[in-house]
């Protein structure tokens, strides 16, 4: 069940964006029996748009001044994204105590920050409702 708390649910969004930037596009992330549903679309090699279904919010990711930035339309927050290998750090320059570190593995994503540790299992298949809509099934 989504908490609808943009600060907490932004952790899963950061994990999703890290997967896309690591060239591992996904449809969702599973955590403790809960599916976080996402849809991503590369607009160019420097711009990505992600739909976060849990929060009913768009995320815009773009490359700027040598690093990636994530703009969360729901909260108006901009996060700086720094990458080292398959590890990503998301920081909010306006709230220096907020950060997320995300490591992307083959089948999992691990996120850690002020709200604790999260382990997500990658979902490469669209959720049944979206798969049915795509094929026209009901």
Image (spheres, rainbow, N blue to C red):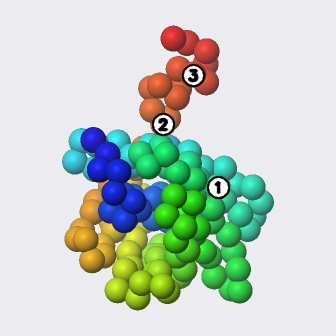
Disc on res. 49: 1
> On screen, 94 above or below 74?
below
In the image, 121 versus 70, the foreground residue is 70
Instruction: Look at 47% across and 25% down and name the residue there.
Output: 129
Instruction: Look at 39% across and 60% down and name the residue there.
Output: 6
Left or right placement of residue 11 versus residue 138 in this view: left
> On screen, 138 above or below 129?
above
Whether residue 132 can be seen here: yes
> Which numbered disc, 1 or 2, marks the residue closer to the eye?
1
Residue 118 horizontal/vertical position (percent) = 27, 63
Whether residue 30 can be seen here: no
The residue at which mark 3 appears reads as: 133
Disc on res. 25: none
The residue at which mark 2 appears reads as: 125
Q: How far apart are marks 3 and 1 (CA)?
A: 21 Å
Q: Earlier in the sequence, mark 3 or mark 2?
A: 2
Left or right placement of residue 47 versus residue 6 in this view: right
- Answer few, some or many: residues within 10 Å of disc 2's Cα (few below 14, many 20 plus, some between 14 and 19): few
Circles 1 and 2: CB atoms closer than 8 Å: no
Circles 3 and 2: CB atoms closer than 8 Å: no
Q: Distance between the residues labelled 3 and 2?
A: 13 Å
Would you identify the image quadrant in which residue 112 lies? Answer: bottom left
Q: How far apart are marks 1 and 2 (CA)?
A: 19 Å
In the image, 74 versus 127, the foreground residue is 74
Instruction: Look at 51% across and 11% down and name the residue there.
Output: 138
């Amino acid at each position: 069940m989504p908490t609808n708390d943009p600060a907490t649910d932004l952790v899963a969004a950061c994990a999703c964006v890290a997967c896309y930037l690591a060239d591992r596009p996904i449809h969702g992330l599973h955590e403790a029996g809960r599916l976080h549903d996402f849809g991503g679309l590369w607009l160019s090699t420097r711009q990505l748009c992600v739909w976060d279904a849990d929060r009913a919010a768009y995320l815009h990711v773009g490359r700027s001044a040598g690093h990636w930035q994530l703009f969360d339309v729901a909260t108006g927050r901009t996060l700086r994204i720094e990458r080292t290998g398959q590890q990503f750090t998301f920081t909010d320059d306006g709230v220096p105590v907020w950060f997320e570190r995300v490591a992307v593995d083959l089948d999992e994503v691990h996120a850690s920050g002020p709200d604790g540790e999260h382990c997500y299992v990658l979902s490469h298949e669209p959720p049944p409702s979206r798969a049915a809509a795509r094929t026209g099934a009901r």
